[in-house]
Image (tube, helix red, strand yellow):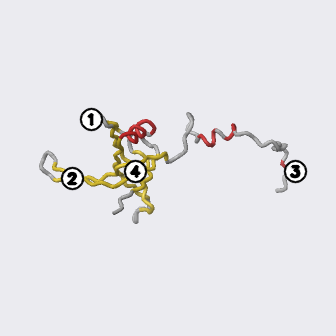
Amino acid sequence: MLNQTVLMGRLVRDPELRRTQSGVPVATFRIAVDRDFGNRETGEREADFIDVVAWRQTAEFVCKFFSKGSMAVVTGRLQSRSWTDNQGNKRYSVEVVANSVYFGEPKRDAFGVPASVADEDKLPLPEDFSSMDSCDEKLPF
């Protein structure tokens, strides 16, 4: 049998960290995952909202580095649960139990600029590099 799920989406709200009675960390969060196709009537793309549960170090990692709006890549397994609520109604829930959670976008600096772009000015130049004059008439195009 195979039960493997990979999702990429944005957190709908900040993750919530709790601990079991034995002290094991558990984080719950929800991600919005865009569908690959648009609505027939409006043409707009819709999203599915998927509950995720992370345990132990993964739970602490998610709560430390992710917040509402963060893009996350989640790998894990799909799990369904059922229970009876206080009114006696049978309830069902489907969630992803995360094995790993990865950053879905590059790290950003304090101004919201991706770090890879912000660090370009700090890259060392090759020894044979020479700057061009600002005069465009020497360019062949």
Residue type at mark 2 is Ser
Report if the CB atoms under discs 2 and 1 are less than 8 Å apart.
no
Report the Cα–Cα distance between label 4 and label 3: 51 Å
Residue 35 at what x, y percent from top left? 42, 59
Residue type at mark 4 is Ala
Which residue in the protein does label 2 denote?
A: 82
Nearest to N terminus: mark 4 or mark 3: 4
Which residue in the protein does label 3 denote?
A: 138
Nearest to N terminus: mark 2 or mark 1: 1
Q: Quadrant of the N terminus?
A: bottom left
Query: SS class of the residue under badge 4?
Result: strand
Q: Is residue 92 left or right of residue 135?
A: left
Q: Nearer the viewer, mark 4 or mark 2?
A: 2
* Quadrant in which residue 110 is drawn: top right
Residue 61 at what x, y percent from top left? 43, 39
Q: Nearer the viewer, mark 4 or mark 3?
A: 4
Furthest-right residue in this view: 138
